[in-house]
Amino acid sequence: MDRVHAERPRPWQAAVAELAEVSGNIDPAEFARLLEELEDPARRCFLSGQGRSGLVAGMVAMRLMHIGRTCHVAGEATAPAIRRGDVLIVISGSGTTPASVRHAESARAEGATVIAVTRPGGGALAGIADLTLRVPAVASAQLGGNLFEQAALIALDGLVNALAAGVPDARGRLRRRHANL
C-alpha cells in the first residue's frame, strides 16, 4: 500500500470508537429490567420511532419476529391495536418527538407497558414510560443523531440476542422466518 493511501482518514473508526464508549456506558441494570420485561415469549411487542429512530425500530421488530415473537411496528398498516398486557418500545433520542410521545400516551391509556429508549433526561417520553433505557449519546463528531441511533440499535440487537439465547434453534428459526419475497 502506498503512503498516500495509508494516511487517509478512516472516519468509520472514529464512529466505532464513539459507539464503543457510549455502549459501554449503558446501565446494565436498566438493560436487565428491559430484558425481564420481555421474557414472556407470548407477550405482544410494538416498536415506534420517527426518522432514523423509526428505522431502528423496524430493524429490531424484524429480528424479534425472526425469533418467533409477535411484534409490530406502530403505525404500519398491518399493526393491530395495542392493549393491556402488550409492550411498546419507543425510540427517541430527544424524548420529545411529538408522534413518539403520542404513541406512548396512547399505549399507556390502553394499559400497555411503555419502554423508552432515549438519551439521559429523556424529555416527556421518559416521564410517561414505565421503564427507560438511557443511551448516553450526548456528544458526537457524527452528523445529527447518528451516534444515538447506532447505540440504540446495538443495545436492542443485544436484547434480541439475549432473548434468542432461550429459544431452541434460534438460528434455524430465523432462517425459516426470514423474508423470501
Image (cartoon, rainbow, N blue to C red):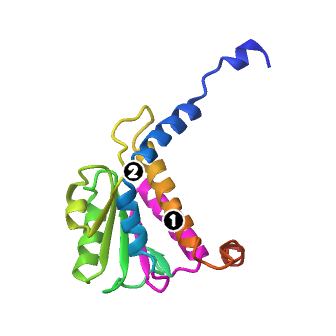
- Residue 104 placement: quadrant: bottom left
Residue at the spot of label 2: 26
Cα gap from disc 1 to disc 2, whole angstroms = 18 Å
Could you tell me which secondary element the residue under label 2 belongs to? loop
Could you tell me which secondary element the residue under label 1 belongs to? helix
Left or right: where 116 falls relative to 20: left
The three-letter amino acid code for the residue at tag 1 is Val
Q: Earlier in the sequence, mark 1 or mark 2?
A: 2
Q: Residue at x 48, y 49 (%)?
A: 150
- Point out the residue furthest to the right here: 1
The three-letter amino acid code for the residue at tag 2 is Ile
Establish if 159 lies above or below 176. Answer: above
- Residue 29 placement: quadrant: bottom left
User: Residue 65 location, x and y as percent?
Assistant: 56, 76
Examine the rendering and report whether any part of residue 105 can be seen: yes
Q: Which residues are magenta?
A: 40-69
User: Residue 156 location, x and y as percent?
Assistant: 48, 61
Residue at the spot of label 1: 60
Q: Is residue 29 magenta?
A: no
Instruction: Sort mark 2 into few (<14), some (14-19) or many (20+) by Cα contacts within 10 Å.
Output: some
Quarter of the image that includes the N terminus: top right
Closest to the observer: 92 or 87?
A: 87
User: Residue 86 location, x and y as percent?
Assistant: 37, 82
